[in-house]
Amino acid sequence: MEGIRKIAVTLLIVLVIGFGLVVSSFGSAIFQEGNPLPLIISAMKLHFSDSEFELFSKTEKRSRYLSESSGNSSYNVVKKYMKSKGWKFQEQMGSGLIFTKTGEDAIVVVKQYSRNYFIWEIQQSAGQIIKKLHTQTPNPWIRGLCHPLLIDYKKPQSVH
């Protein structure tokens, strides 16, 4: 009984030291995007499915996806996805891809996460965010406080 306890304690110490060495060596890469848990779950889903991408984070201003890196261009996955949503590819500026749809722009930023995966992030245009603000707030005076538009102001009437 005493021998099993010593082996268990030794194994626990070795595991803690090993985990500490891995985190100290690769911690900055593992935690470069904050909490690595959503990325680990998305990577597992990608590995066990036929999907080319996996959504791992979505806010009002942006959506973030994880995809596997391959020998060909990583941008093909992004372009294919955006095309399926009705966006037309305009140009590439560094790691940013610019798409247009009905006069609005969307910017997709692509960055390498690890040797096997890359992250791409779709950012909503300012026009889309302002539209949401104005459609969500019914009172024009409250909307004006948030982000005034010229149509929210009344012209002063002349008094004669």
Image (tube, rainbow, N blue to C red):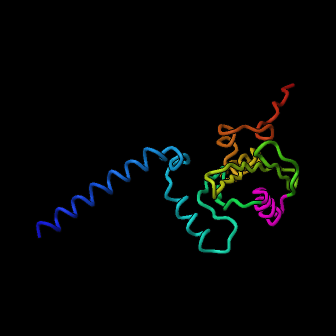
x 87%, y 57%: residue = 88
Residue 49 picture location, percent across and down:
63, 74
Left or right: where does residue 22 sit relative to residue 148? left
Magenta segment: 72-87
Who's the residue at 33% across and 57% down the image?
15
Q: Percent position (x, y) of residue 23?
A: 43, 48
Identify the residue at horizontal 82%, vertical 49% (top origin).
98
Give the farthest residue toward the left: 2
Q: Is residue 125 above or below residue 76?
A: above
Query: Which part of the image, by quadrant, shows the N terminus?
Result: bottom left
- Residue at coordinates 75% horizontally, 47% vertically from top-left? 125
Residue 62 percent location from the top left of the image: 66, 51
Compared across the picture, whether 79 is left or right of 33 comes to right
Q: Which residue occupies the extreme top position in the image?
A: 160
Considering depth in this image, is 35 or 16 the residue closer to the camera? 16
Q: Residue 102: give x, y in percent of width and height.
A: 87, 55
Identify which residue, 98 or 153, lies in the foreground.
98
Q: Is residue 107 magenta?
A: no
Q: Which of the pair 32/60 is nearer the observer? A: 32
Secondary structure character of the magenta stretch overall: helix
- Work out whether residue 134 or residue 159 is closer to the camera in this orientation and state it: 134
In the picture, measured across the screen, residue 136 lies left or right of residue 97, that is left
Q: Quadrant of the C terminus?
A: top right
